[in-house]
Each structure stands twice: as C-alpha cells, then as structure tokens.
Amino acid sequence: MWTEKFDLHSHSTNSDGQHPVEDVAQMMSDSDVHCWSLTDHDTISGWDTARTAADTHGLVFIPGVELTCMPGLQADVNILELRNQERASDSWHLLAYFPTIEFHNEQHKQFKAWLAPLGEGRIPRMMAMVEKLAELGMPVDFDAVLARAGDSVGRPHLADEMIKSGYVETRQEAFDKWIGDGKPVHITRPKPSIVEACAAVHAAGGITSLAHPLYYCIDTDALVTFCLESGVDAIECFHRSHSDAYRFQLWSAAKDSGLSVTCGSDFHGMMYNQTPGRMAVPTATLPLSIKNSMPSLDETVHQS
Ligand SMILES: [Zn+2]
Ligand SMILES: [Zn+2]
C-alpha cells in the first residue's frame, strides 16, 4: 500500500527556505499533505508556529530538524567517477523527528541546548567566509547576509548577497566558483558525527532518517549497513532528487535489512520551481512512530 499523505522534509525562512512557516503549512495543505514535518537546518525555532499553523489546516505536525553532520563514510570513487563528480558533499544531513515530544518539557529543553552551538557555529563561519571573499576582492556586507537568514544563516544567503553585488549571476555560479565544498571561499564548521547526533535525538525521544543519500555517493548496501550500525532509524529513500531507479534500489536494500524509510520533497520554495507533497511512500516501511501519529492512515490509504 502506498500513500502520498506524508511530506517529512521541508524548509522555511527560519533556515534557507523562501516562505515563512505559516505559508509552508498552507502550501502543504493545498498539496493534500496530511502529515507534515518542518525540518529547518540546525534549528527548531519554527516548531511552535508550525504546530499552530498545522492545527489551523488540520495537518498532523511532526516536529523535525535537519542536522548537519560529518560524513559517515568516504565517497565511493567508482560512483564519483560514474557521475563525473570531483567530490561528494562535505557533510551528511540527518533528519530528526520527534512525533511524541511534549513541547517545553525537559527533553525538549535538553535537545535545544544540544542543538544551540550547531546553529551558533554558523555565524563565525559565515563571518570568516565574508572575510575570505573580501580578500578576493568581493566585499559583501556581513549584516546584510545575516539579515537574509532567519535563525540559521547558510551559504545560500551569502550567494544571494553575491548576486546582489554583481559578482555572480546565480546561486549555482556562486557555489560552483567560490563557496561550494572545496572551493576557494568555503570554510567548514564543527559538526557532530552521525552517531553523536543519533544519540542526542534518541535521548530526546526522537528518531532519525538519513537525508537524500544520493548526494553522498555510497553504494546502497553499504549505506544501509552504515545506518544499522550507527543507530540511524530510517533512510530517506523517497527524496525529490532521487530517480525512480535509485528509490527502488535503496528501498529494496532497506526492506531486506529491516530498516525503515521516509519520504520528503525537501521543499525550499516556489522560486526554485519546487512543490511540496506528492511523494509516494510505501506505508508498511515508514517508521512506526510516524505511522502512529496518523491513526487514520489505513482509512486514507484505502480511500485514495
Ligand atoms: Zn539536506
Ligand atoms: Zn533539506
């Protein structure tokens, strides 16, 4: 049985999304999503607003976050070569979901405290990138970059400021030439390992799913084994960027090993030609705690 009622990966202006939380909730509802997770990068500041907005639209809200972690494995050179890529992403993204968390209780506070330095680490890193850019003859206003971000400043915000200053024409060009992984202006920041992040999420009663695994250039069986050995509860097989063939290959590997799967549009905004929802996922392999947050699931599946 498959369903399109879940979208477990989306961003708002609290990180690098285009739309405020309320608008993301509205668009999820318009796309016939029934169970929605807001997963801004390294911040949970949107949870309260998101829950209220979800209530307004009759959506089931799963509090979430996308954690920037150190890579779990080294990219497979054969896959890099096959895809004609120099290198894989210098971080792995781990989605964390808290379907049963009580807001503002001790677990919530502890997780927030664990998360704070990850979000705060973004500011000195951005400052250093702005300094490097100035050294290369491309000064941008640091405060203007910060003003573009909600609570979680990132490279897309810097790229937009570079476009405004006329140094590049598109975000892609900014990443390809200057600020992408391994490029002259790129600076890494402290990141937890996947194992550390899983432990912090589990301590707060949450579960994890490895986001968009395609980007990491790892063999699917090796990825699944890594997740099982590192305490990752699920894998985001059904990510918008995955081809049908890759989804099927990863889903088969996950199913064979008993690992759960999740789905997500990774919606950042209409200006990127993205749409929320419409992500088909097999209900049987969703994580149990996510399935349980939508008791009407069987009913809705039969109706659709
Ligand atoms: Zn991501
Ligand atoms: Zn994302």
Image: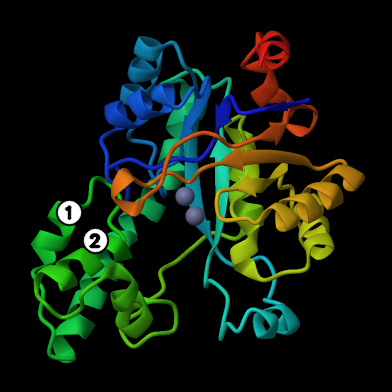
**Mark 1 residue crowding within 10 angstroms, few (<14) / some (14–19) / many (20+):** some
Give how far across and how far down residue 147 sits, in percent: 13, 53
Give the amino acid type for the residue marked by disc 2 in the picture.
Answer: His
Give the amino acid type for the residue marked by disc 1 in the picture.
Answer: Arg
Give how far across and how far down residue 133 sits, in percent: 20, 83
Q: Which mark is residue 198?
A: none
Contact flag, marks 2 and 1 (Cβ < 8 Å): yes
Asked whether residue 235 is in view, the answer is yes
* Vertical placement of residue 16 versus 286, above or below: below
Give how far across and how far down residue 245 sits, in percent: 74, 56
Q: Residue at x 48, y 46 (%)?
A: 266
Image quarter of residue 51 = top left
Asked whether residue 98 is in view, the answer is no
Q: Which residue is mark 2?
A: 157
Secondary structure of the residue carrying tag 1 is: helix
Q: Which mark is residue 148?
A: 1
